[in-house]
Structure formats: C-alpha cells, structure tokens
Amino acid sequence: MSPSHFSSLPNDIAWEVLARVPKCKYPLLACLSKNFTYLVRSPEIHKIRSLLRKDSLYISFRNKNYRAQNPRWYTLRRAENNPSENQFVVSVNPALPNHYHRMPSIVAHGPEIFFICGPFVQSPSFWVFDSRTDVLRRGPTMNANRTYKSVGVVGRKLYVVGGVRSNENVAESFDLTTETWEPAPVPKEEKTWLASATVSLDRKVCALMLVGAYTVCYDPWDGSCESFALPEDKWWKTGVCVMENVLYVYYARFGLMWYDTELRLWRVVNGLSDVKKVRSVGMAEYYGKVALLWKEHGGCGKEIWCRMIAMGKCEEGVKGTAESAQLLGSVPDGYRMDNCLSVSD
C-alpha cells in the first residue's frame, strides 16, 4: 500500500496498524508526510501499544561498594491484567560472562540491548541481549581494540567512537541488518570520548562528557564534530534521554531541562514545579512520555519511585504534565541506578 493510499484510511484503523510496526521504524515513517508524523507521534498510538504491552524499560542497579559484581536488572512493563498499571519486576540477568567486561557502554535499539565492552580495559568484545527471548549472545568482534567509547544508533547502524591510543580516535559502525562491522569516518575532533552518557540526536552520536560541562556530537556521514555547552551544575549520567529528537537532561538544581537546537541554549521544562528535586534519576521514553525514576531511603533498602511526564509545546517552549508519583519497589542498600533503557518491539 502506497503512503497516499494508507493516508486515506481512518485514523483509528491507521493507528491499529502502525501500533504493530516496530517502534524503531517510526522516525523513518515520520519522514514520509505530515500525516505520518502526526500518526506516529499521537498519544493514541501509544495507548494501543500499551494495550499490546509493546514497550518496557530495563533498569540496572550496581553495588557501588563492589563494582566488579554484575549489576541487578529490573524491568518496568505494563501489567497483563491492567494496561494502566506498571509492574517493576526482577528481570532475567543479561550479565556478561567475564568480569573484565564490567562497566560496558550500553545502548538499546528496538527489542535488543547492545553491550560494547570496556571502557577502561581494551576489548573488541560485543554482546547482544534479546529482550524477546531473554537470550544473551556474543556478537561479531569489533575491528578496533579501543578503550573509551561513545555509542549511538543512527538509522540502521550502531556507531562506536573511541580512542585506541592516547590522542588517536577511530570510529566504526555495526550494520543492524547484516550484523557486520565496517570502518566509519574518523572523528575530526581530538577528544577522549570518555562520556557519562551518549544519545542519538539529529542523526548524530552525541556524547555528554564526563569531564567538563559540554557535549560533542559526531556526524557519521563525514566525521565532523560540533560541541555545545551543558548548564553549570552537577548532573548524573542516568538523567538523560531523547524523545522526538529533543534532548532532555535532569539537574538537581534546575530540574528537567531541554536543549533548544535552534537557539542553541538550555531551557527549563515548564509546569513541573511540583516535581520533587532529587540528586540522581533515571530517564527514558515510555509510551510517549518521559519516565522519571529516582530512589529514596525506605524501611528496607531503597525505594524506587516513578513519575510519568507528558511533554507538549507551549509559547515558552516545552511544558510538562506530570502524573502522580508511583512506588515501584525497592533495591538493596548500597545500590545505585546505573542504566535506564527504553526497549520496544
């Protein structure tokens, strides 16, 4: 069916069809026409996906006193009997078999989670966890043996940018269709690429640097790089996500902020004055909303709380509407939030 014929379908039928298309295809569909953009970004399609239990979050917690141990993984997903209720459950553990692979660079795309080993030990190892089957498999070995790595998915390729030796950077891409590695354009900016978080924005791999309040964006088409500043405040690597090509970062001092790529400045998300200010959060897209997770000291271990925030445009920029806070469960004392990943069919 051509796009023009599909657009002639009633919206309720179009949503039922598109809700069953892999979510990773939505950016491509949005490029076809304004109508497709409206269909894949409408709250209606997220309601249908929720009924189908298509999306989930994978959250890992690491014992900060025993960093060599594998993290504990949990999932947040819709309850089978009540699509409006979230369940926070212990997940199958996608732990890497070798302790030298601890603290890998991690990125999710579609139903899979990719582990690029390192960052402090040179390793070309590459692992893939399939959330549909709960199977961890070893992927094809990377061509370069690097330490510091920044990773991101652009289109149908996963890009890895990092340093082989001091002041020497390389990049390569993993084709998600053919599952093969090939060289990518060398970054034209000399950086260590030691990032606290990496996201895909404007079809670029953007690394929020561990040292210094700035972000470097690598363009996989020609290797060019551009930078922009981060607000001068402490921030935490899990408090970062991109939704509908907008970068959001959470700050304990300022709250939830978004980056205006046209004006090249950071702006506060309006309407969230009642959202509790906390030091460290996890953030990811969940059924068209930003899921904001944080921990508090409870009677037994640390309580994990969550608020869903719907984003919308307003005259001042972006306005958020937060749902009531929900207690998800608890984790042992001494565990910190390490990763918060959006996984979808």
Image (spheres, grey):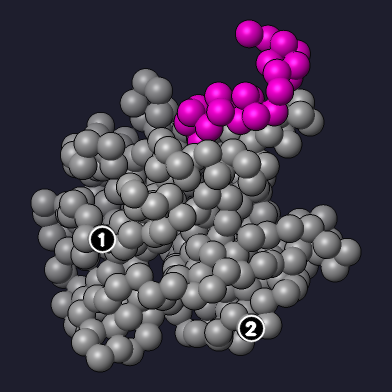
Q: Classify the position of the C terminus by image quarter.
A: top left
Which quadrant of the structure image shows residue 336?
A: bottom left
How dense is the environment of label 1, judged by Cα within 10 Å: few (below 14), some, or many (20 and up)? Answer: some
Instruction: Give percent across and percent down for residue 204.
Output: 60, 45
226 sits to left or right of 34: left
x then y, percent, for residue 313: 79, 58
Q: Residue 143's spot in the image, x, y percent? A: 31, 35
* Residue drawn where x is 68% and y is 59% of the image: 311
Looking at the picture, does residue 336 appear above or below residue 14?
below
Q: Residue at x 27, y 51 (%)?
A: 117
Q: CA distance from mark 2 to mark 1?
A: 28 Å
Is 304 placed left or right of 167 in the picture?
Answer: left
Closest to the observer, 330 or 126: 330
Q: Who comes first in sequence, dot 2 or dot 1?
A: 1
- In the figure, 230 relative to 21: above or below? below
Mark 2: which amino acid?
Asp
Decide which of 127, 239 is in the foreground and name it: 239
Q: Where are the magenta residues, as a range?
A: 1-25
Taking 300 as reference, is 127 above or below it?
Answer: above
Farthest residue to the top: give it: 1
Q: Which residue has dot 2 on it?
A: 274
Q: Which residue is mark 1?
A: 89
Image quadrant for the N terminus? top right
